[in-house]
Image: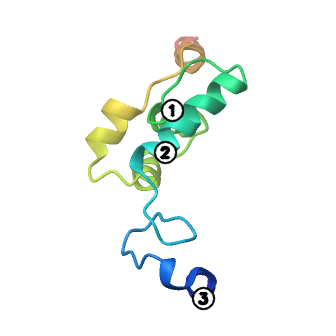
Amino acid sequence: MLEKENKEFFGNTYSQNPELFVWEDGHTIAPDYVYHHFKKLVKEFGRPDITFHALRHSTASLLASRGWHPKDIQEWLRHADFYTTMNIYTHLDQDRLVERSERLTGILKNRMA
């Protein structure tokens, strides 16, 4: 186990810690560490300014556009309720709405003919 190896390597400087996200020496990784490094990477790679949290919204929307079942998206994002996933996190793609509209129009035209 890696924790055991780290305890042996760091000896009495190892920090016994119940937290999930810790450095090799057992000290807690600060909650804003990922946020700050994500911002640096976004800038370094010339990507649009986006927050780390916004990735959850993007994930929900992309999965929906790929045909994932809404309940599966809810479970993937580990939301407690369906409303949060579908009404807050999932944003419909405009191209997808146009495609669905055109498909519906084709169905209706065929039934009327």
Secondary structure under the numbered disc 2 in the rendered image:
helix
First-in-chain label (2 vs 1): 2
Location of residue 26 in the rendering, given as x and y in whole percent from the top left corner: 48, 72
Location of residue 80 in the rendering, given as x and y in whole percent from the top left corner: 27, 53
Residue at left 58%, top 70%? 24
Q: Amino acid at mark 1?
A: Ser
Question: Badge 2: how crowded within 10 Å, few (<14), some, or many (20+)?
Answer: few
Residue at left 63%, top 83%? 9
Identify residue for label 3: 8
Residue at left 38%, top 69%? 19
Locate the C terminus by quadrant: top right
Q: Is 6 located above or below residue 63 in the figure? A: below
Q: Is 68 located above or below residue 11 in the figure? A: above
Q: Nearer the viewer, residue 25 or 41?
A: 25
| Distance in Å between CA atoms under marks 2 and 1 | 26 Å
- Can you tell which quarter of the image residue 65 is in? top right
- CB atoms of marks 2 and 3 within 8 Å: no
- CB atoms of marks 1 and 3 within 8 Å: no
First-in-chain label (2 vs 3): 3
Seen as rendered, the residue at the extreme front is 12
Q: Nearer the viewer, residue 103 or 84?
A: 84
Location of residue 59 in the rendering, given as x and y in whole percent from the top left corner: 53, 38
Location of residue 33 in the rendering, given as x and y in whole percent from the top left corner: 49, 45
Please name which of the two marks, 1 or 3, marks the residue nearer to the observer.
Answer: 3
| Distance in Å between CA atoms under marks 2 and 3 | 26 Å
Identify residue for label 2: 33
Q: Is 21 located above or below residue 44 in the figure? A: below
Identify residue for label 1: 61
Q: Amino acid at mark 3?
A: Glu
